[in-house]
Amino acid sequence: MDMTTNLTLRSGNRMPIMGLGTYGLDDQTADTVEAALKMGWRMFDTSGDYDTQPGIGQGLKQSGLERGRYFITTKVEEDDDAYEAVMNNLKELDLDFVDLVLIHRPPPDGAGEDLWHGLIQAKLDRLTRDIGVSNYNTEQIGQLIEATGEVPAVNQIEWTPFGYSQQMLQFCREHSIIIQAYSPLTRGKRLDSPVLKTIAQRYGKTPAQVLLRWNVQMGTVPLPKANQLQHLEENADIFDFRLNREEMERLNGLNEYYSSWSVLPYIEQLATR
Ligand SMILES: NC(=O)c1ccc[n+]([C@@H]2O[C@H](COP(=O)([O-])OP(=O)(O)OC[C@H]3O[C@@H](n4cnc5c(N)ncnc54)[C@H](OP(=O)(O)O)[C@@H]3O)[C@@H](O)[C@H]2O)c1
């Protein structure tokens, strides 16, 4: 297993087991993406509102890698015309198609059925290979499926040992939906956890590497963001150790539905049951 290892989406298409988050990448985005590709990173997560799409497109070109060797995820906003937004994103990325488009978050009313119809059309027109959602709870995903018969390939949500949901994991497994984990490093806020530090020391690793490894072993797909090359290298270096069952259980036991933002948007309905 390494950075180029893939897992299979419900469509049969393949997706890398870890990707680089790009929210907050600075004006060096193109060079960061090029450097990341050289280190073996193969998936990049962006959105129309991250301002990183032109830099990503440039970095991909600078790398000279063929289109089939990297995986690009982008997103549409809740008040967008989804189809048009996909076209705009492709223009900014300077690509003919992306690998995955997500509804960034559910709109205030309903589950975003209109957005979903737009993404289904974008997929039919081969502007994207797969479609999915972000920040959705299980009920909202159910509504999209009921309205269209189309099951999201992915739900991208905040996901760390400090904040996750067994019920969501179970639901996604039952529907063959892959969970992508955003803010998998707690945006740096929980890296001093004694449990993380103790486990990290056993393997000569860092708390950040333990967090990423926890995700990969759970079958969820972390999207750590890193501007610093040293962080990019460190985050890629998680394939030479394995957390044992006791360590995974200890990490699982840290769950307090924590969010580094405010609340986990998918959790309310589950946590109060
Ligand atoms: N769908 C959504 O609604 C949504 C919401 C939030 C995020 N996301 C996606 O998820 C990605 C990641 O989430 P995030 O950026 O919020 O947070 P994150 O990945 O948890 O944390 C990023 C922070 O951690 C630092 N860092 C990276 N590697 C480190 C290491 N090995 N040791 C110590 N610190 C390290 C980074 O520093 P440097 O940058 O200085 O290297 C940066 O300050 C985003 O970029 C975005 O693509 C999606």
Image (spheres, helix red, strand yellow):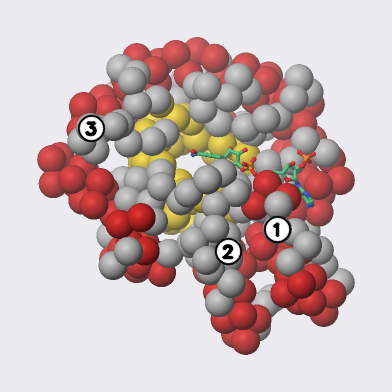
Asked if the residue at label 2 sits under 8 Å from ligand 1, the reply is no
108 on left or right of 13: left
Q: Nearer the viewer, residue 269 or 71?
A: 269
Quick check: marks 1 and 2 in contact, CB under 8 Å? yes
Of mark 2 and mark 3, the one earlier in the sequence is: 3
Task: Name the residue tied to disc 1.
Answer: 190
Residue 97 at x, y = what percent? 45, 25
Task: Name the residue tied to disc 2.
Answer: 162
| Quarter holding residue 173 | bottom left
Instruction: Pick out the residue farthest to the left.
Output: 147
Residue name at image x 66 percent, y 60 percent: 212
Residue 27 at x, y = what percent? 76, 20
Residue name at image x 31 percent, y 46 percent: 152
Residue 208 at x, y = what percent? 74, 58
Quadrant containing the C terminus in the rendered view = bottom left
Secondary structure beneath disc 3?
loop
Give the residue type at disc 3: Asp
Q: Nearer the viewer, residue 189 or 166?
A: 189
Of mark 1 and mark 2, the one earlier in the sequence is: 2
Secondary structure beneath disc 1?
loop
**What separation in Å lies between label 3 and label 1 (alpha carbons)?**
34 Å
